[in-house]
Image (cartoon, grey):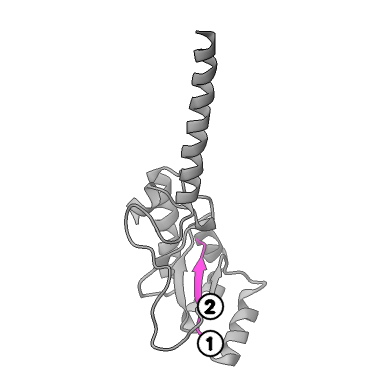
Amino acid sequence: MAMKRMVSPILGLAMLAVVLGGVHLFSKSRTTQLFGDIIPRVETPKPMVALTFDDGPSVRFTPEVLAILREHGIKATFFLTGKETEENLPQARMIVSDGHQVGNHSYTHSNMALMGSARIRDEIERTDAAIRTAGHKGEIMFRPPYGKKLLGLPWYL
């Protein structure tokens, strides 16, 4: 009997490790989730590069990046955080006025994989509001911080 007691906790820990490992892999999958759609690639008639930036906007980098893009006639997608958008609204407005696509990258750039539904809603809605305040009128795509999502985030989106 003593042997069974030793095996059971070890087996339980091994099963937990497998489950957590699977959860970790699933949470960062770029092609699979339980709810909604992931856009891992877009088919185009000719070869193309999609240039995206995460985080920001910032006083330090945004004007310089925008000047380079403008100089070369390049459009990009900027996935903005809500907090930085609120703190750097003139730079966010520059991104919008230059005609770049704007996306939501959460309010605080926290890992959202195990976040509760109220906090997920707050992270997304506050950022969408900040992006709208910057003047963006179109669809707002979402890119999760660190690429992490599990159940709550895809369900909300």
Whether residues under marks 1 and 2 lie with C-beta atoms below 8 angstroms apart, the answer is: yes
Q: Name the residue located 49 percent from the left edge and 32 percent from the top edge.
A: 16
Res. 135 visible in picture: yes
Q: Which residues are magenta?
A: 75-81
Q: Is residue 23 left or right of residue 139?
A: right
Q: Name the residue located 43 percent from the left edge and 68 percent from the top edge.
A: 40
Residue 61 in picture, x, y percent from top left:
65, 74
State yes or no: residue 79 in magenta. yes
Question: What crowding class fits label 2: few (fewer than 14 Cα within 10 Å), some (14-19), or many (20 or more)?
Answer: few
Does residue 46 sit above or below 121 in this rendering?
A: below
Which structural element holds mark 1?
Answer: loop
Residue that mark 1 sits on? 74
Q: Is residue 69 left or right of residue 8?
A: right
Residue 125 in picture, x, y percent from top left:
39, 57
Q: Nearer the viewer, residue 89 or 131?
A: 131
Which structural element holds mark 2?
Answer: loop
Indicate which disc residue 51 carries. 2
Does residue 62 sit above or below 106 in this rendering?
A: below
Whichever of callouts 1 and 2 sits on the residue coming sooner in the sequence is 2
Residue 6 in picture, x, y percent from top left:
55, 16
State yes or no: residue 115 in magenta. no
